[in-house]
Image (spheres, rainbow, N blue to C red):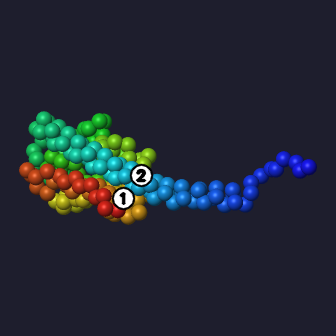
Amino acid sequence: MRGAQAGLTLVEAVTGLLILGVLAAVAVPRYADVQAKAREVRVKGLAQSLRVVAVAARSQAEAQGISCAADGDAQVRIDEVMVPLRHCYPQAQADLHGGLLAASGPLAGEAWLVRRPATVPVGTVGELLVQAADAPDPARCAVRYVEAPQAGEPAEVSPLLGGC
């Protein structure tokens, strides 16, 4: 008389591993796709925040009677943050604790790379590239902000999603 059998047979173990392998082959690509979509949403959200700050800065500048011909010497306060202006739109500054980026919301807790010198000579149209640091190609998973080139023309905010 034999006792109760304990454990799995070789066939059962191989079948279980085969099932797990098939599930992993299906789940891993879907997980990667979800991460890419999440980065795209984050980039689009930041782009929208920058647009809102740019419009708010323009509105406050007009309400305060600031000349939009001013090229770098005016500023407005948005949500307790001083935002330097160029032609009534925020200057492109790589400062997470002041200016455009600070007024757009809490970026410091997220994985962003900011590409822009902290100071730009007056009279030069500045550009800011805020990249998703965890993207496969951060330079193409980013938000591009370009200062207003002259009075009467708006600043440009463009999400770049090709590398997310």
Q: With 101 as the anchor, is 14 left or right in this view?
A: right
Q: Amino acid at mark 2?
A: Val
Which percent across, then down, holds residue 55?
18, 42
Residues 48 and 118: in front is 48
Q: With 89 as the anchor, is 34 left or right in this view?
A: right
Cα distance between the residues tagged 2 and 1: 11 Å
Residue depicted at 15% across the width and 38% down the height: 59
Q: Which residue is mark 2?
A: 34
Query: Mark 2 or mark 1: which comes first in sequence?
Result: 2
Tell me the mark number nearer the camera, choosing from 2 and 1.
Answer: 2
Which percent across, then down, holds residue 20?
59, 56
Residue depicted at 54% across the width and 59% down the height: 22
Circle 2 residues within 10 Å: few <14, some 14–19, many ≥20: few
Which percent across, then down, holds residue 130?
33, 56
- Judged from the image, the secondary structure of the residue bearing numbered disc 1 is loop
Residues 157 and 25: in front is 25
Q: Which residue is mark 1?
A: 164
Q: Are marks 2 and 1 in contact (CB under 8 Å)?
A: no
The quarter of the picture where the C terminus appears is: bottom left
Residues 31 and 153: in front is 31
Residue depicted at 18% across the width and 60% down the height: 125
Vertical order, 83 against 153 (above or below)? above
**Residue 14 falls in which quadrant of the image?**
bottom right
Circle 1 residues within 10 Å: few <14, some 14–19, many ≥20: many
Q: With 117 as the anchor, is 135 left or right in this view?
A: right
Q: Amino acid at mark 1?
A: Cys
Res. 73 mark: none
- Judged from the image, the secondary structure of the residue bearing numbered disc 2 is helix
